[in-house]
Image (tube, rainbow, N blue to C red):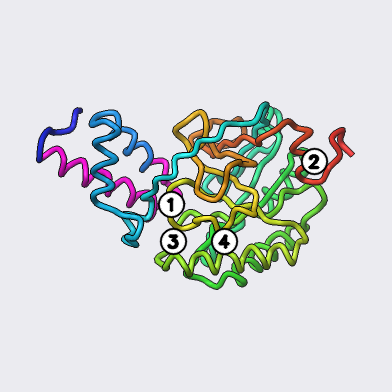
Amino acid sequence: MPFATHGQGRSQENRLISLAYRVLLIYPHSYQAGERLIARILKNVGVLATVALFAAACSPQTDDPICIAYTRHELRVCAAGPTVQGIDVSKWQQYVDWDLVKGAGKVFAIARSSDGLNTNDMYFERNWNEMRRVGLIRGVYQYFRASQDPIRQANFLLDKVRDAGGFVPGDFPAVLDLETKDGQEVSVVVARAKKWLEHIERETGVRPIVYTANFMSSVVGTNFSAYPLWVANYTTSCPLMPTGWTNWIMWQNSGYGSVPGVTGNCDTNDFNGTLADLRAFVGLDADGG
């Protein structure tokens, strides 16, 4: 249904944009819903009108949660060449048949350990061991809560991995999932995320990966550009980058993937390179050694 026109329409459009960005921030695991709503607005009222409305409501100095995603950063970066495919999962996918996932041609998978300190992922240990058993290159991520102690969160992830058998050569570096301010000032988010990253790197000897998206640009700035980027963007053939990066190592391209062995939808991902490139990234020989 087309939006209303003139003054009434402009007010409605502005409210819808605000709503979409509240979805991005208040329900960060569902930020694709906000992206879809924004795409609908763009389709119905035009890019320039929508950008003007949002820019009028927000500015780079504004710290209102609605305006966290305000950004002029519009860099899109396509894959450098061939890619290989994988998935990521959490408790929401419940019991995964990893043999079927492997049989569907997936090469890697990343499982959530927890949402901060409060939500333990009960399927992690099984996922961690099953991914390795079937021959997938595996990884672990933690949804980061800036309102909680970053070292305790990092140790929680490390303990979960240790209890599940530990890291082995060929595993992905641990991933910091940074997609919400969690009610904190930007400076607090950055400082605590850095503490998490530095602690994980000290404990594992491997530089972690940062998962984030363009809508977090006003938070991440250029503070994390030294870390490999796993970028989330569901609406394009080439992902929109957050500030601080000009390349990505992984791209989460959908939250609605249908993959054999997974009940319901799951996140699908591309690794930016060939299988040999992926093996080299995780410290394995290209030919399987």
Q: CA distance from mark 1 to mark 3?
A: 10 Å
Q: CA distance from mark 3 to mark 4?
A: 20 Å
Residue 68, position in %: x, y?
A: 37, 55
Q: Is residue 117 left or right of residue 21?
A: right
Q: Which residue is mark 1?
A: 28
Judge by depth and name the residue closer to the eye, 122 or 285: 285
From which residue to which does the magenta span run?
Answer: 8-33
Mark toward the viewer: 2 or 4:
2
Judge by depth and name the residue closer to the eye, 3 or 118: 3
Residue displayed at 77% across by 58% down:
166
Q: Which residue is mark 2?
A: 280
Instruction: Tell me if mark 3 has few (under 14), some (14-19) or many (20+) residues whose alpha carbon lies within 10 angstroms of its own.
Output: many
Verify whether residue 32 appears in magenta.
yes
The residue positioned farthest toward the right in the image shown: 289
Q: Is residue 164 left or right of residue 7?
A: right
- For marks 2 and 3, the one nearer the N-term is 3
Q: CA distance from mark 2 to mark 4?
A: 31 Å
Judge by depth and name the residue closer to the eye, 26 or 286: 286
Disc number for residue 120: 4
Instruction: Tell me if mark 4 has few (under 14), some (14-19) or many (20+) residues whose alpha carbon lies within 10 angstroms of its own.
Output: some
Q: CA distance from mark 2 to mark 3?
A: 33 Å
Contact between labelled residues 1 and 4, with CB atoms less than 8 Å apart:
no
